[in-house]
Amino acid sequence: MYTALRRFIALALLACIPLVFAGCGSGGGDTAPKNVTVSGVAAINGPISGAQVTIYQLRPDGSKGALIGSGVSDATGNYAIEIPATTSPVLVEVTGNADATYDSNAPNAGAPVAYTSGESMRAVLDGVPAPTFVAVTPLSEFAYVTLQQILTATPPATLAGTVAAANTRVAGLYGVDSVTADPAVAGNNAALQILDQMNGHAASLTGLLTIVTPAQLAPNLAANGSLLDNPAYAEFQQQFIAAAATVSAAPSADLTVKAAVGAVVAQINDPGVQPDYNDTAVPTVPTGLTATAAAATTTASIVTLSWSPSTDNSAVAGYSVFRNGVKIKTVATTSYADTVAPGQAYVYAVVAFDAAGNSSAVSATATVTPVAPNLSITVNGQVNP
């Protein structure tokens, strides 16, 4: 079993590496008087049980504001907390205590690992206007630290869009749709397994702490250059790839796990350039959205979406696809195929975003109602299903 100090070293390493891709954001004041539920899971690789989960308003400088809700994660790491609905940024924090533990796949692990009172992980959101799922993991912690680095190195005009930029930039680094998505999702699961392996070998990363500091990384951020130009990132990249090889070689690693690990490593090897976080120009609204349904099986249909590209003063980084008002996917192209159940109506919309966290207005919607195929045949005048 490895120590809490080693876990801190690995998380500190993540905290000292800058950002990577970017996404959509919004902001505003609190207008909704209703309460909503923030539910989710706390996990490192395995779930964290018995941890304190607290939700705060986020101040414009990125620090904690007023406490707006609290709870405790259960034996499976899940939690559910009711808070006032808000369109202002919030912080979800998971803190250890004497009873909190988690399972690990890192070297020498086996028995539950203590998650002590000195340890915490966080997730940041643009707001919580409706019930929201939030996984608090090393991925969301990386995004939180990314936000702090942005605010220190190149303070942007608004916090809300910057929260989105930090979350989506880290998601882009690891090739996942969202840093706060369920850890069971293939890409998120692969990334967390790799980071847990890095935790287990944290002693070998100690030297990085002496050469990687926010102050040293600030020029790299300001220059909007590639992370590959940063010596600290090169060391992180090397350790990450070694940990990924260990995960892929594990007896439990099937083809799905290996493919997910390979996709994450590919993103780590191609991190892209730093965006200009002082860019406040929003992309144009996507136009021409169409939705066409076709039967895939008797119980599933494929809805093919396409739209015309948006434009931006720098470049459009991607598009968020919404089904019935809920974001289901982030894509880099102007099309997406969604698998749904037939027999009900689906309303789609698209939002464009750039690398600095600016998002367009929502596109006009497209509605489609997939129909289940009639697979019956007629033989000698008899209808056979």
Image: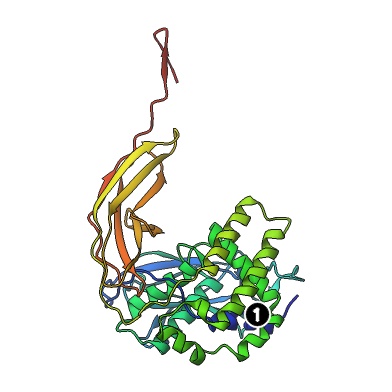
Q: Residue visible at 59% across and 74% down? A: 237
Residue tagged 1? 7
- In the foreground, 132 or 32: 132
Q: Residue visible at 74% across and 70% down? A: 109
Say whether residue 32 is visible.
yes
Looking at the picture, does residue 114 appear above or below residue 47?
below
| Local secondary structure at mark 1 | helix
Expressed as whole percent of the image width and height from the top left, the position of residue 319 reads 34, 61
Q: Is residue 131 left or right of residue 254?
A: left
- For disc 1, the neighbor class at 10 Å (few under 14, some 14 to 19, many from 20) is many
- In the foreground, 340 or 315: 315
Expressed as whole percent of the image width and height from the top left, the position of residue 111 reads 75, 69
Position of the C terminus by quadrant: top left
Q: Is residue 348 left or right of residue 264?
A: left
Q: Residue 37 falls in which quadrant of the image?
A: bottom left
Q: Residue visible at 49% across and 71% down? A: 271
Looking at the picture, does residue 220 appear above or below residue 201?
below
Amino acid found under the numbered disc labelled 1: Arg
Q: Residue visible at 32% across and 82% down? A: 278
Expressed as whole percent of the image width and height from the top left, the position of residue 13 reads 59, 82
Residue placed furthest toward the front: 229
- In the foreground, 284 or 113: 284
- In the foreground, 89 or 250: 250
Expressed as whole percent of the image width and height from the top left, the position of residue 351 reads 30, 62
Q: Is residue 240 left or right of residue 360?
A: right
Say whether residue 65 is visible.
no
Q: Is residue 304 left or right of residue 73?
A: left
